[in-house]
C-alpha cells in the first residue's frame, strides 16, 4: 500500500536532539520532494524544510536554520529530520509529507505521514 | 517569513456555501500560483484539497474550489456537509524557495 510510515513517539530532555524517520512505500522514492511540517498542541501547521531525494540539497525555513537537518537515504526510501538544541516549545507532532509533482516543494502534499509526537520535558 | 493570514473561524449551515480567505504578500501568494489548501480533522494528519490555486486531486469532492486574486487566495466549500467540520490551512511557495502555511481556520457546521 502506498504510504508514509513514521517512527514512534519520542520523549527528550531540553538541550538534546531528536531524529524522526519517514519511510516511503512508493514506486519511486527519488522522484518527489519530501517536507517536514510540525504542529504544536492546539496550534497550526508550520513548515520546517524540504528535500528532493534526487538533488539531496535541503531547503529550510528561516525559523529552523542551524537547528534542523533533513536528509534522505535512497537505499531504504527513508527521509530523516533531526532537530537539535531541543526546548519545551519544540513539543509537537512532526509530519512528513510528499509532493505530488516531481519538480520540487510547492505544498502539493498528496501524501502525509501519520505524525510522530515529540515531547521535550525535563 | 510570517504565516499567511486566515480568519480564525467560519461557520455555516448544511447546504450553504462558505469561503475562507488566505492573505499573504507580494513575495508569496502575489507572485506564485503554488497555493494549496489542506483539511485536518481532529487528531488526524492533514489532507490535500486543492493545489496550484485551483486544482483538485482525484477523489476530492468538487464541492471544494480554490481561487486567487492579488495577494489573497480563497477556498470555497459549497453544499456544506457535517463532515466538512474541520480545520483548514492554506500554504504558499515563497520568493525564498520555502513554503509558508496560513494561521488556520476552524469551520463549524451549524
Image: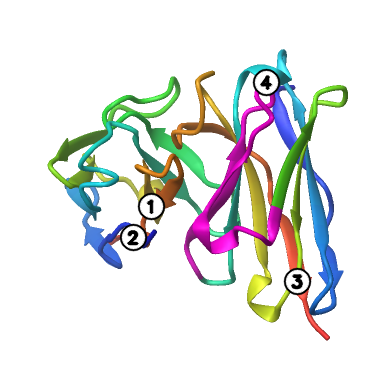
Write down the residue under mark 4: A54
Image marks 1 and 2: residues in contact by CB distance under 8 Å = yes
Q: Is residue A3 above or below residue B3?
A: above
Residue found at the far top of this picture: A27
Q: Do labels 3 and 1 share a chain?
A: no
Q: Position of residue A13 (x, y in %)?
A: 84, 78
Image marks 4 and 1: residues in contact by CB distance under 8 Å = no
Write down the residue under mark 3: A85
Q: In which quarter of the image is the C terminus of chain A?
A: bottom right
Give the mark, 3 or 4, whose residue is nearer the N terminus. Answer: 4
**Residue A27 falls in image quadrant:** top right
Of discs 3 and 1, which sits in the foreground? 3
Q: Which residue is drawn at 27% across and 31% down?
A: B33
Q: Does the magenta stretch include residue B83?
A: no
As helix, strand or loop, the secondary structure at mark 4 comes to: loop
Of discs 3 and 2, which sits in the foreground? 3
Q: Which residue is drawn at 25% across and 61% down?
A: B10
Identify the chain of the residue marked 4, using the numbered disc in the image.
A
Does residue A34 appear left or right of residue A29 in this picture? left
Q: Position of residue A82 (x, y in %)?
A: 77, 54
Write down the residue under mark 2: B105
As helix, strand or loop, the secondary structure at mark 2 comes to: strand
Q: Quadrant of the N terminus of chain A?
A: top right
Q: Where is residue A4 in the image (x, y as percent from the top left)?
A: 72, 34
Q: In this view, does A12 lie above or below A49?
A: below
Question: For the residue carrying disc 4, how many other residues have a C-alpha within 10 Å: few (<14), some (14-19), or many (20+)?
Answer: some
Write down the residue under mark 1: B88
Amino acid at each position: 500500500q502506498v504510504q508514509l510510515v513514521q517512527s514512534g513517539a519520542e520523549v527528550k530532555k531540553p538541550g538534546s536532539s531528536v531524529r524522526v524517520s519517514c519511510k516511503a512505500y512508493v514506486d519511486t522514492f527519488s522522484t518527489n520532494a519530501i517536507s517536514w511540517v510540525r504542529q504544536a498542541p492546539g496550534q497550526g501547521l508550520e513548515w520546517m524544510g524540504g528535500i528532493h531525494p534526487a538533488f539531496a540539497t535541503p531547503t529550510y525555513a528561516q525559523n529552523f536554520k542551524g537547528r534542523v537537518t533533513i536528509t534522505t537515504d535512497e537505499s531504504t526510501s527513508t527521509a530523516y529530520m533531526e532537530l537539535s538544541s531541543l526546548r519545551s516549545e519544540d513539543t509537537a507532532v512532526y509530519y512528513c509529507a510528499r509532493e505530488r509533482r516531481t519538480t520540487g516543494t510547492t505544498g502539493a502534499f498528496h501524501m502525509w505521514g501519520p505524525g510522530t509526537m515529540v515531547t521535550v520535558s525535563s | 517569513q510570517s504565516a499567511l493570514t486566515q480568519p480564525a473561524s467560519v461557520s455555516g449551515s448544511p447546504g450553504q456555501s462558505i469561503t475562507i480567505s488566505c492573505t499573504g504578500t507580494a513575495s508569496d501568494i502575489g507572485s506564485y500560483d503554488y497555493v494549496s489548501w489542506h483539511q485536518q480533522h481532529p487528531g488526524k494528519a492533514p489532507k490535500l484539497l486543492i493545489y496550484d490555486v485551483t486544482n483538485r486531486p482525484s477523489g476530492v469532492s468538487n464541492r471544494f474550489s480554490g481561487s486567487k486574486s492579488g495577494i489573497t487566495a480563497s477556498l470555497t466549500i459549497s453544499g456544506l456537509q457535517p463532515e466538512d467540520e474541520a480545520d483548514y490551512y492554506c500554504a504558499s511557495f515563497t520568493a525564498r524557495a520555502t513554503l509558508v502555511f496560513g494561521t488556520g481556520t476552524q469551520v463549524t457546521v451549524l
